[in-house]
Image: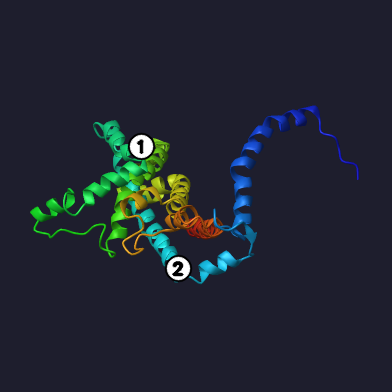
């Protein structure tokens, strides 16, 4: 079978996209393939040379009770933090969409936490949560409530991390929701008012259907980020403690791969994280369409 020759126009087009494909290969495809290869090997940096063991790393993790606890922590954090950020962000965006005086100032203030580096956020909230010199416990004392070990109590520590993380990620939801609301034509609201629609009916039948697409994108991005990239804030606040109460998959991967230098085992955890994240995103997309 004779393969048709490309026209000069097609050759020119391929030449233009070649740098983008090369960058995609170097940044995404090659690291993914290397990570898969690494996960099938045993390699303790500086102690053991790399050799292949098949699915040994995966079997090791799935037989380790600690891995299941870390996996449960990650799912719990995602299941609590993402809906919390979604509803608070949507509610604040709806309030900001009203014609209020100084709206641009309020919007700038609400979006400011998103601009702060996560490490700085972790340090700031660590100071707020501190048992002896923090700002929260004295306020609780004035209200007649005893001091709380925000980061030292295993039953509270994860909620403390969720609050700190939500503080700097709610602006992300606000930005998406507010942008979507601003793109809705006023004629739709005017038609709803003429027909006697209440505020709830206008939200249900006008606002939400109009911004459903952009909200789904924000929800998916945030869920993926919460499941696979929760490291900076949690590690600065608790380091995964106390007693693995806030240990999540990114911290667990770092501890195995970059602290204990078990590169093959760490790569396996990274791929397991990617696998569960993909399943979670598919479930969210399927549920969102209903």
Is residue 5 shown left or right of residue 259? right
Q: Residues within 10 Å of mark 2 (few under 14, many from 20)?
A: few
| Location of residue 225 with respect to 76 vertically, above or below | above
> Residue 119: which quarter of the image?
top left
| Location of residue 161 with respect to 25 vertically, above or below | below
Q: Which residue lies under the disc numbered 2?
A: 68
**How is the rendered protein coloured?**
rainbow
- At 62% across and 41% down in the image, what residue appears? 26
- The residue closer to the viewer here, 87 or 202, is 87
Marked residue nearer the N-terminal end (2 or 1): 2
- At 44% across and 64% down in the image, what residue appears? 71
Residue 273, given in percent of the width and then of the height, sits at: 51, 58
- At 56% across and 69% down in the image, what residue appears? 59
Q: Which residue lies under the disc numbered 1?
A: 115
Is residue 32 shown left or right of residue 159? right
- At 30% across and 36% down in the image, what residue appears? 107
| Location of residue 175 with respect to 48 vertically, above or below | above
Classify the position of the N terminus by image quarter.
top right
Residue 277, given in percent of the width and then of the height, sits at: 50, 57
Q: Which mark, by number, is residue 288?
A: none
């Amino acid at each position: 079978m004779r393969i048709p020759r490309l026209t000069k126009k097609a050759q020119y087009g391929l030449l233009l996209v070649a740098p983008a494909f090369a960058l995609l290969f170097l940044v995404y495809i090659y690291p993914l393939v290397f990570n898969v290869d690494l996960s099938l090997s045993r390699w303790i940096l500086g102690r053991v040379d790399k050799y292949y063991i098949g699915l040994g790393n995966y079997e090791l993790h799935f037989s380790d009770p600690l891995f299941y606890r870390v996996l449960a922590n990650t799912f719990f954090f995602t299941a609590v933090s993402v809906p919390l950020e979604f509803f608070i962000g949507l509610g604040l965006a709806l309030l900001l969409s009203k014609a209020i005086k100084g709206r641009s100032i309020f919007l700038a203030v609400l979006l400011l936490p998103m601009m702060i580096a996560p490490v700085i956020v972790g340090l700031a909230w660590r100071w707020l949560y501190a048992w002896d010199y923090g700002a929260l416990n004295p306020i609780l004392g004035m209200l007649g409530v005893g001091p709380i070990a925000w980061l030292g109590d295993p039953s509270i520590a994860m909620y403390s991390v969720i609050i700190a993380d939500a503080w700097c990620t709610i602006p992300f939801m606000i930005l998406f929701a507010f942008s979507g609301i601003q793109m809705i034509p006023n004629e739709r609201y005017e038609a709803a008012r003429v027909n006697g629609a209440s505020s709830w009916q206008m939200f249900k039948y006008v606002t939400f259907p109009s911004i459903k697409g952009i909200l789904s994108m924000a929800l998916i991005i945030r869920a993926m980020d919460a499941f696979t990239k929760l490291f900076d804030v949690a590690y600065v606040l608790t380091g995964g403690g106390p007693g693995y109460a806030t240990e999540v998959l990114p911290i667990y991967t770092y501890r195995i791969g970059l602290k204990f230098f078990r590169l093959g085992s760490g790569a396996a955890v990274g791929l397991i994280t990617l696998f569960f994240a993909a399943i979670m995103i598919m479930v969210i997309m399927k549920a969102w369409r209903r």
